Every structure is written in C-alpha cells, then in structure tokens.
Amino acid sequence: MIDLLILLVSWALMIVGCVFVVSGAVALVRMPDLYTRLHGASLTDTGGTLVIGLALIIQALFVFDNSMAAVKMGLILLFTLFTSPTASHALAKTALLCGQVPLDAKGNPLLDGPEQASLLARSRPADYRHGQDKERIAQQIQALDNRGGDES
C-alpha cells in the first residue's frame, strides 16, 4: 500500500513538473517580446525542473533504494536553482545593452529608444575607468568622517 502511495506521489509530481515545462514552451510562443518570453520560460523551467527533480529523488530513495542517485539529483537541483535565474538575468541585461526595448501589453515601447535601453542596463557610466570605484568610495568615507566630526 505504501509503495503505491509513493509511486502515485512521485508520478503526480512528474506530471505537475511536465505541465510547468509545457507552459513555459507556450509562453515562448504566446508572449509579445523577449523580456516577457524570458520571464515566462525561466520561471516555469526552474519550477518544472525542481518539481520533476523532487519526484526523481522520491523514486531514487523509495523505489530504487539508491541514496547516491538521490544525492546527485539534489546537487543537480541545487545547481539548476542558481544557474537558471542567473542565465536569464544575463540574457536580459545583454538584450538591454544591445538596445532591445521592452514593450508594454499593447506592444508599445516602454523606453524612448535603444540608447535609453542601453543606458539603463549599464551599471557604470560610459566614461568609467579602472579604479574609479575605489576613489569614489574613499571620497564617500572621507565625507562621512568629516560630517561625523562636525556633529560631535
């Protein structure tokens, strides 16, 4: 009886994970622009992978009695949990840097142009030079020290 329950739970999780993954594929086709497609696909991809992985861990532990396979699957899930959102973020930032303008629900651009999209994605100004952050931080610390001395 318990074996049947374990099989039902693991297969239910696999089906739910497959529905997540298929809905991500539908999002790739139905969404209007790169950013909404990326959002829909990355969320469902990560969620589907986690749910399917949980089902496989249950199968490995209780059906096949293989704890090493469960540990390996857990590590795969851990790496997927970190790498998939990071890759999606990098792809979206690169699209902004290249001037890909996001669209609203009606298909109108949210920014004035590709230049504004590129500027939005930059974490540093275009005229940045190496070591400039260190100088700026030192100036901020000195300003805080000077202000702290005036208040005492």
Image: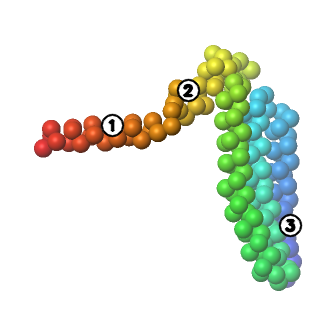
SS at mark 1 in the image: helix
Query: Which of the numbered marks, if any, corresponds to residue 11?
Result: 3
- Label 1 and label 3: CA atoms lie apart by 60 Å
Residue at the top extreme, as displayed: 112
Q: Are marks 1 and 3 in contact (CB under 8 Å)?
A: no
Check disc 1 and give the amino acid type: Gln
- Label 3 and label 2: CA atoms lie apart by 53 Å
Q: Quadrant of residue 132?
A: top left
Query: Disc 1 marks which residue?
Result: 139
Residue 20, percent across and down? 80, 51
Which of these two is toward me, 33 or 116?
116
SS at mark 3 in the image: helix
What residue sits 33% from the left and 38% below the top?
A: 140
Q: Is residue 68 left or right of residue 110?
A: right
What residue sits 66% from the left and 29% below the top?
A: 97
Snapshot colouring: rainbow
Query: Disc 2 marks which residue?
Result: 126
Q: Quadrant of the C terminus?
A: top left
